[in-house]
Image (cartoon, rainbow, N blue to C red):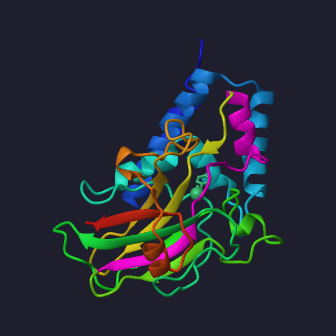
């Protein structure tokens, strides 16, 4: 017969925690964790393997690699936390992911975030507005994306200049922003750590559809962390981190007009993403 295993005693041990939120969290953690262990009934070897897995996850974290975020992402927990904390209006939010590291370089409107010059030219123009459509002057738009061949600058410090694919822009008086980049590709998330082991054990692929990351913020409004997904990308229906939302899939139109290309300082044909970001 399965004994209680001390569940009630552990719950009682947390009952006096001074902070009511901590009390609730520790009680819920105890109930769910003990229920999980009672259901799975791990052998001692399996429990040691689980602890080893988490130990190695921590050991793969440093200033440029965050394996715990990756694990939370592939388990769908990052998206769950996003959804639970999202407002019910405005641009939908998605995971921040593990590659928003440090401050993005401040860039002028119209600048290029692409420092490599490899890939299909792309112009992004947009506006940051509130729920009534009023432009948010001085809103900040923090952008990061991987290169045309699918790596972030921090993954290739010897091949990409620091800050490649990143930029922090300030919207003008009409809430507008624009910049140049290259069309990102779809690509696998890092699989050389414990999160990759988990994907392989599950027979899951590691790919994310092509996207550009955005954090938009303005005084007096809730910031939004979101993505613009490239509408014709593979893997939109099976993102390894479950972050695709229909409203975030955007056309990257092909523009083959010399005059418009010259106005943005790009060659043609180029791709154009128009992005309205709505803050609640
Ligand atoms: C990313 O797109 O940067 C990303 C998000 C979640 C996990 C790995 C990568
Ligand atoms: Fe990304």
Q: Looking at the image, is 13 positioned above or below residue 272?
A: above
Q: Looking at the image, is 231 positioned above or below residue 271?
A: above
Q: Does the magenta stretch include residue 58?
A: no
Q: Where does residue 7 sit, x and y in percent of width and height?
A: 53, 33
Magenta residues, start to end: 175-202
Identity of the residue drawn at 49% across and 55% down:
95
Residue that protrudes farthest toward the right in the picture: 158
Q: In this view, does 248 lie to the left or right of 76?
A: left
In-front residue for pair 108/123: 123
Identity of the residue drawn at 33% across and 66% down:
277
Identity of the residue drawn at 59% across and 58% down:
184
In-front residue for pair 25/204: 204
Can residue 14 be seen from the camera position used here?
no
In-front residue for pair 272/263: 263
In-front residue for pair 161/253: 253
Task: Classify the position of ligand 1 by quadrant: top left, top right, bottom left or bottom right.
Answer: bottom right
Identity of the residue drawn at 78% across and 56% down:
59
Q: In this view, does 116 lie to the left or right of 99?
A: right
Q: Looking at the image, is 195 positioned above or below residue 95?
A: above
Q: Where does residue 221 sit, x and y in percent of width and height?
A: 28, 73
Q: Where does residue 25 sit, x and y in percent of width and height?
A: 45, 49
Q: Is residue 177 magenta?
A: yes
Screen quadrant of the N terminus = top right
Q: Where does residue 17 sit, x and y in percent of width and height?
A: 45, 57
Residue that protrudes farthest toward the top in the picture: 1
Residue that protrudes farthest toward the left in the picture: 132
Residue that protrudes farthest toward the front in the picture: 258
Q: In this view, does 172 lie to the left or right of 237?
A: left
């Amino acid at each position: 017969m399965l004994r209680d295993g001390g569940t009630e005693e552990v719950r009682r041990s947390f009952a006096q925690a001074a902070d009511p939120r901590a009390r609730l969290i520790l009680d819920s953690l105890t109930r769910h964790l003990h229920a999980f262990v009672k259901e799975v009934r791990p052998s001692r070897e399996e429990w040691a393997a689980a602890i080893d897995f988490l130990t190695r996850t921590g050991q793969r974290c440093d200033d440029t690699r965050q394996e715990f975020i990756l694990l939370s992402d592939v388990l769908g927990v990052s998206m769950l936390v996003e959804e639970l904390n999202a407002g019910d209006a405005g641009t939908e939010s998605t995971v921040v992911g593990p590659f928003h590291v440090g401050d993005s370089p401040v860039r002028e409107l119209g600048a290029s975030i692409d420092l490599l010059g490899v890939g299909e030219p792309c112009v992004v123009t947009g506006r940051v507005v509130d729920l009534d459509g009023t432009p948010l002057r001085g809103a900040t738009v923090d952008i990061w994306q991987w290169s045309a061949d699918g790596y972030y600058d921090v993954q290739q410090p010897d091949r990409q200049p620091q800050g490649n694919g990143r930029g922090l822009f300030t919207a003008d008086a009409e809430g507008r922003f624009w910049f140049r980049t290259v069309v990102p590709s779809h690509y696998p998330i890092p699989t050389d750590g414990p999160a990759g082991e988990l994907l392989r054990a599950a027979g899951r692929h590691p790919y994310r559809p092509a996207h550009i990351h955005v954090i938009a913020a303005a005084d007096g409004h809730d910031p939004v962390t979101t993505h613009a997904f490239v509408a014709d990308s593979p893997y939109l229906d099976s993102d390894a981190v479950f972050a695709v939302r229909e409203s975030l899939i955007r056309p990257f139109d092909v523009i083959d007009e010399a005059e418009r290309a010259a106005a943005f300082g790009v060659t043609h044909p180029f791709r154009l993403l128009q992005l309205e970001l709505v803050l609640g």
